[in-house]
Image: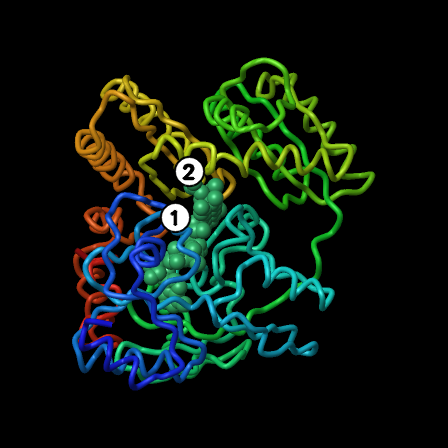
Amino acid sequence: MTDARLAELAARLPNLRLLTDPADLEHYGRDWTRRWTPAPLAIALPGSVEEVQAIVRWANERNVAVVPSGGRTGLSGGAVAANGELVLSLERMKSVLGFDAVDRTLTVQAGMTLHAVHEAAREQGLLYPVDFAARGSCLIGGNIATNAGGIRVIRYGNTREWIAGLTVVAGNGELLQLNRGLIKNSSGYDLRQLLIGSEGTLGIVVEATLRLTDPAPPSQVMLLAVPSMAALMEVFALFRSRLTLQAFEFFTGAALRHVLVHGAQRAIDGDHPYYVVTEFDAGEAAQDAALAAFEYGLDQGWISDGVIAQSEAQAAALWRLREGITESLAPHRPYKNDISLRISALPGFLQEIQALLGREYPHFEVVWFGHIGDGNLHINVLRPDDLSDSDFIAQCEHVTKLLAETLQRHGGSISAEHGIGLVKRAYLGSTRGEAEIALMRGVKQVFDPKGLLNPGKLFA
Ligand code: FAD
Ligand code: MLT
Ligand code: ZN
């Protein structure tokens, strides 16, 4: 260990796992964005809250920046360490600390995967309802730090709704117990909510008390082919009014082509511009209502074709068409946008932005998909083979600028669920006012006086 600061940390915490091998630096220094060259000082893998506190105190004494790190499935560069930071990975802290049947809460360390949280809830006959395709790799601490959304938001809301308490190490090493599992707590500012979605800039989430709920009722899954975005909005209104939706997700024909290349099975013949995967509470009445809605949609010309899953395996195959998109696009190193609008503002925005992109960037393959029922669209620009990395990024930055300007006019946000991180920090001002950003910076200063937690993320 050649760095004197690291040698000192190792001497202070003899049981701390510290990695400095180049392969580890590379592995832990990047997230899914793959845009920045990883260059951390070292990787610390604490095994206890006390070790996390000691690391943060040492970082304050030695002025070392710290990047809190979960499963690094983040899509905004939030967990990237490219400037000699210490990566503080929570992955060894992955135990269930307690379950309370009366409160219906599960208390866990921050390093449990989302999948492990699902399993732990299931073992108690209950549900932790936040869910999305990265469930096997992302960690609950990362989900909290990004206020993760996913495919069930339409029914259950974002991560924010499910956090009853947090234990956090602030930027000066102090331990904060935030809300302690209470349902009602009207005793001042709710700092727990401030931490949720703070992208590792205010504190390190070390433990969380999660609210659980009843298991979801039996459900049915349907795939619909839809001729236009305008029709898609009609289908959403139709299905939402007639069924109790658990999910309502969309993707384009272009997205489908990529998933099919990656081994998924086609479920509807022909090429269609748009598809919807919807899941809704099952039952005889629901089945009839779904078929009636489907037929009405066909008559109106809003639906071109559709299929309803007849088994769990078929339901999983339909979901794969939607959930496999991110991985199928990854080889194209897409530039990702993750935008949010009020649902009522979607049609006007879409009309404007599709015309704009078609006019200004006809050479780009733009793949649309996402959580249309939440007003959350993922707009992925694929990297053309004949464009250099720097030209591609420059052009995509311009696309994002156009998006940000259009979103601003329609009252939207440049990030719905992935966070600002490094990728979108130049556009924070399109979503938040100057006075609001000044207050956010003030909050950062209070929690992290020396600015050592995830510097350069969220704010430029
Ligand atoms: P990381 O990527 O490790 O970190 C994310 C941010 O949180 C960073 O800023 C990091 O510094 C901070 N952080 C991590 N742990 C802590 C901690 N303990 N304390 C404080 N700060 C911390 N996201 C969605 O919201 N919805 C989706 O539907 C969705 N689908 C996805 C599908 C795929 C296939 C992939 C690859 C990603 C998807 N994501 C989705 C994005 C990503 O999985 C989420 O943002 C997730 O919450 C990140 O968790 P993580 O543990 O990987 O965090
Ligand atoms: C999704 O909804 O699939 C995710 O947010 C991942 C992505 O945007 O690629
Ligand atoms: Zn998403």
Does residue 269 appear in this view? Answer: yes
Residue 238 at x, y percent in the picture = 61, 32
Q: Is residue 367 above or below residue 378?
A: above
- Does dot 2 land on a helix, a strand or a loop? strand
- Mark 2: few, some, or many residues within 10 Å (few <14, many ≥20)? many
- Asked whether the residues under the numbered discs 1 and 2 touch, taking CB atoms below 8 Å apart as contact, a structural biologist would say yes
Residue farthest along the right direction in this orientation: 284
Ligand 2's quadrant is top left
State left or right for residue 154 relative to residue 393: right
Determine the residue positioned at 72% across, 39% down: 220
Determine the residue positioned at 38% across, 44% down: 340
User: Where does the C terminus fall, quadrant-wise?
Assistant: bottom left
User: Where does the N terminus fall, quadrant-wise?
Assistant: bottom left
Determine which of the numbered discs, if any, sits on residue 416 in the image. 1
- Mark 1: few, some, or many residues within 10 Å (few <14, many ≥20)? many
Determine the residue positioned at 59% across, 35% down: 320
Disc 1 to disc 2, how far (Cα)? 8 Å
State left or right for residue 165 relative to residue 242: left
Q: Is residue 15 above or below residue 347?
A: below
Determine which of the numbered discs, if any, sits on residue 377 in the image. 2
- Amino acid type at mark 2: Leu
Residue farthest along the top direction in this orientation: 270
Residue 397 at x, y percent in the picture = 21, 36
- Answer yes or no: disc 1 within 8 Å of ligand 3: yes
Q: Quadrant of residue 123?
A: bottom right
